[in-house]
DNA sequence: CGCGGGTTTGATGATGCTCAAGCCCGGTGG
DNA sequence: CCACCGGGCTTGAGCATCATCAAACCCGCG
């Protein structure tokens, strides 16, 4: 049942896990269902688990004083989501996480995480890689955000994630790009016009 | 001589290093001087070392097709700089790093880094924390970048780093905020006017 | 003194926001 | 079965913010 996690780990560290290791790992994950109505992680509340997305989409975001949503990242199948800061520090989370459709996740508590790191060094290594990659991606996103216009960012987002518009409502794509839904609509309209010409 | 590094590590992991551990660590760092003219890390070239900033300021940035500089982060005393992606993957770096004034750094090679992680588990833990914190900071920066106007971003930057304008030229502060030097100048002018009223 | 990099100031224009209305479409209830 | 929501997407007009182009200014330094 946790085969996806095993494959995910093996792919990232470019090593295979023994069956014993995989079995151990399985024991530390418990399935969680979310239909998208309730929050998986809430701002201000300690996030005591990290989640592996098995099926569905999760969405990490902040809400500003005006109530506007700003999405920090989307988590599709095979992604890990959670508030890392809160998870490791035990302090209140700064992000919110919700499912965008009926979603199954596998949750790992902090205690089990620590055990896993000690018992399976490969797991700790894996997690370091995970965070490194995430860090890097976010640094690049900052750089791209400065360098590119909203239109360019949208085009390259669609290029790297062609299926994203089919799974995520447009107003959330806009909030990921840092613009308003109206602006994204206009950008799409402009691009469609260019293509047909 | 590497006392700053020891303190830096101990502070972050909230544990003390033994004298033996500190001595071992010292052996893995070699001092590097930079007057700011040459690059410490260059885009396209593999970054084989991570650097601890002992004195001075380093500046991580990308350059777009038009030649404009976009600074990703500033590294003051006690910061670690380097192209993490390149350092761990062995692929060409995506960032550039330069000193902004005569700067001394301590460099650690990837081989020594691996040795350090095996011989001193506390060091691996420390580094994981370092990357985690960096990751978190960059996620927050993305969120803030969406939420706040350039003026608000400038105000909160000055609040958290009051000494920054004294050490970094204004056009680089602008490039960190994602705006042009002219715009920052106008923002500063506006704020000064408000204060005096 | 004059040069040059950094900063300031001004005028104009592009990009994305705000406010506002209309449209499309799936779901609900009469 | 259809009328009527309501959420999300689109479209329009005017506005705010920041970029661009360009010139002037300031000041340390050769």
Image (tube, coloured by chain):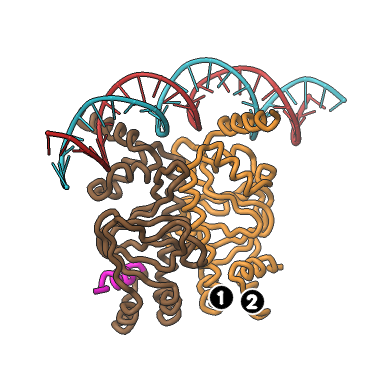
Chain colours: A orange, B brown, C red, D cyan
Query: Is B2 contained in the magenta span?
Result: yes
How many dots with numbers? 2
Instruction: Indicate the secondary structure of the residue bearing disc 2.
Output: loop
Q: Nearer the viewer, residue B77 or B120?
A: B77
Q: Nearer the viewer, residue A119 or A141?
A: A141
Q: Which residues are magenta?
A: B1-12
Rounded to the nearest angstrom, the CA distance separating label 1 from label 2 is 8 Å
- The quarter of the rendered structure image containing the C terminus of chain A is top right
Which of the labelled discs sits on residue B17, or is there none?
A: none
Q: CB under 8 Å between callouts 1 and 2?
A: yes
Query: Is A73 contained in the magenta span?
Result: no
Q: Residues within 10 Å of mark 2 (few under 14, many from 20)?
A: some
Outermost residue on the bottom side: it is B20
**What is the chain identity of the residue bearing mark 2?**
A
Residue A38: x %, y % from top left: 60, 49
Quadrant in the rendering for residue A177: top right
Of pointers 1 and 2, the one earlier in the residue sequence:
2
Q: Determine whether A120 is above or below B148 in the image.
A: below
**What is the chain identity of the residue bearing mark 1?**
A
Would residue B117 be found to the left or right of residue A32 on screen? Answer: left
Residue drawn at x 65%, y 63% as measured from the top left: A31
Which of the labelled discs sits on residue A122, or is there none?
A: 1
Q: Is residue B150 visible?
A: yes
Residue D1: x %, y % from top left: 87, 25
Q: Main secondary structure of the magenta part?
A: helix
Residue D4: x %, y % from top left: 72, 22
Q: Which residue is mark 2?
A: A17
Residue drawn at x 49%, y 67% as measured from the top left: B88
């Amino acid at each position: 049942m946790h085969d996806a996690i095993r494959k995910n780990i093996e792919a990232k560290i470019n090593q295979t896990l023994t069956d014993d290791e995989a079995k151990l790992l399985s024991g530390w994950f418990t399935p969680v269902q979310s239909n998208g109505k309730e929050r998986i992680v809430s701002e201000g509340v300690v996030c005591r688990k990290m989640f592996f997305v098995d099926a569905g989409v999760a969405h990490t975001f902040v809400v500003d004083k005006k109530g506007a949503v700003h999405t920090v990242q989307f988590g599709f199948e095979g992604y890990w989501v959670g508030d890392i800061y809160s998870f490791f520090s035990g302090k209140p989370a700064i992000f919110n996480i919700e499912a965008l459709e009926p979603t199954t996740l596998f949750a790992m508590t902090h205690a089990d995480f620590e055990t896993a790191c000690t018992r399976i060094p490969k797991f700790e290594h894996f997690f370091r890689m995970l965070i490194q990659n995430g860090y890097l991606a976010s640094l690049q996103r900052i750089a791209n955000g400065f360098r590119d216009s909203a239109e360019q960012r949208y085009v390259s987002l669609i290029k790297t994630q062609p299926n994203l518009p089919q799974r995520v409502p447009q107003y959330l794509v806009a909030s990921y790009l840092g613009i308003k839904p109206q602006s994204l609509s206009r950008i799409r309209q402009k691009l469609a016009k260019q293509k047909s010409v």
